[in-house]
Amino acid sequence: MPPSPARSLPPPPFTAPSAPPQEVHLSSLSSTSLKVSWVAPPAASRHGAIVAYTVSYQSTGSASEDPERHSVSGIGADASSYVLEGLEKWTEYQVWVRAHTDVGPGPESAPVRIKTKEDGRFWFWF
């Protein structure tokens, strides 16, 4: 009797990630730029290949003239950091990161806050 053909299993169902990127950290590079870094979501919660990241940010506090939330999407899947530029001087921002599969976006990370640096002009009195 010939061997029976192997049964092929259906591909696993792919979905959006069920966990956000981990270890989101911010560092103030200048008075108008911040570096955002992260670690990919845990492998068990990716539910497919990560194809991109989105970094969202918003200034905080009542002194902010632009409380609108901004997003930078399409950050490459192999990225683990991104530099936000053109920010306001000496302003606090909150930042979120989310991962995407081909199916869609996963949840956002918890917001992380940091303040951009002062202008960088220093006065010395002798």
Image: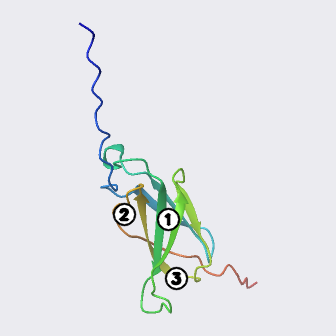
* Quadrant for the C terminus in the image: bottom right
Q: Nearer the viewer, residue 13 or 74?
A: 13
State the residue at coordinates (60%, 72%).
Answer: 33
Q: Position of residue 122 (x, y in %)?
A: 70, 81
State the residue at coordinates (46%, 72%).
Answer: 56
**Disc 2 designates what residue?**
109
Can you name the residue that lies furthest to the front here?
1
Name the amino acid type tagged 3.
Thr
Q: Nearer the viewer, residue 7 or 31?
A: 7
Q: Earlier in the sequence, mark 2 or mark 3?
A: 3
**Disc 3 designates what residue?**
91
Instruction: State whether residue 72 is above or below residue 68.
Output: above
In-image side of 98 versus 65 (left or right)? left
- The local secondary structure at tag 3 comes to loop
Q: Earlier in the sequence, mark 3 or mark 1?
A: 1
Can you name the residue that lies furthest to the left here?
1
- The local secondary structure at tag 1 comes to strand
Instruction: State whether residue 64 is above or below residue 77.
Output: below
**Dot 1, crowdedness within 10 Å: few (<14), some or many (≥20)?**
many
**Disc 1 designates what residue?**
26
Q: Earlier in the sequence, mark 1 or mark 2?
A: 1
Instruction: State whether residue 60 is above or below residue 14.
Output: below
